């Protein structure tokens, strides 16, 4: 955890496919990028921000997300999600998150992850 500091940033990009749409994910009835897929992208960006800074015996798990999905992204659009560490308190890491399509912000918010021991987690 000593290596996790504010300002660390992760970025992921994807081309919106039919499998990413609200129809495919059951979150709506239009063929645009689904909000659950945007959530997954900003979580992936947060994980990328942490990189290999966690001990091999630990991982991070998402515990909270506050995301405003502001604009639609059609099939074929390139969407880039980013996450920047904004606070670190013991095992809790907070990120500022955004998603863009070209120069337009399509989503923004905050995401919290907690560092947990891999052994025994979920059992």
Image (spheres, helix red, strand yellow):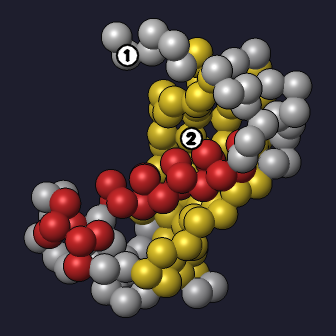
Q: Relative to 63, does residue 23 appear above or below in the rendering?
A: below
Distance from label 2 to label 1 (Cα)?
21 Å
Mark 1 secondary-structure assignment: loop
Q: Residue at x 19, y 60 (%)?
A: 25
47 or 75, nearer to the observer: 47
Q: Residue at x 49, y 84 (%)?
A: 78
Q: Position of residue 11 (x, y in %)?
A: 66, 63
Q: Which mark is residue 14?
A: none
The residue tagged 2 is 111
User: Residue 112 or 12: which is nearer the viewer?
Assistant: 12
Decide if residue 39 is on the left or right side of residue 93.
left
N-terminal of the two: label 2 or label 1? 2
| Observer able to see residue 92 | no
**Residue denoted by label 1:** 122
Circle 2 — which element? strand
Vertical order, 100 against 38 (above or below): below
Q: Report the front residue among 113 and 55.
A: 55
Q: Position of residue 105 (x, y in %)?
A: 57, 73
Q: Residue at x 50, y 33 (%)?
A: 62
- Image-based side of 72 in relation to 88, left or right: left
In the rendered view, tell whether residue 4 sits above or below residue 24.
Answer: above
């Amino acid at each position: 955890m000593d290596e996790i500091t504010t300002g660390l940033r992760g970025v992921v990009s994807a081309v919106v496919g039919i499998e990413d749409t609200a129809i495919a994910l059951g979150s709506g009835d239009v063929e645009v990028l689904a909000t659950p897929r945007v959530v997954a992208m900003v979580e992936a960006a947060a994980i990328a921000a942490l990189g290999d800074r966690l001990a091999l015996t630990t991982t991070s798990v998402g515990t909270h997300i506050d995301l405003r999905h502001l604009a639609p992204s059609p099939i074929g659009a390139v969407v880039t999600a980013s996450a920047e560490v904004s606070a670190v308190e013991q095992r809790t890491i907070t990120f500022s998150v955004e998603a863009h399509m070209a120069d337009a912000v399509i989503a923004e918010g905050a995401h919290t992850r907690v560092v947990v021991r891999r052994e025994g987690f979920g059992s």
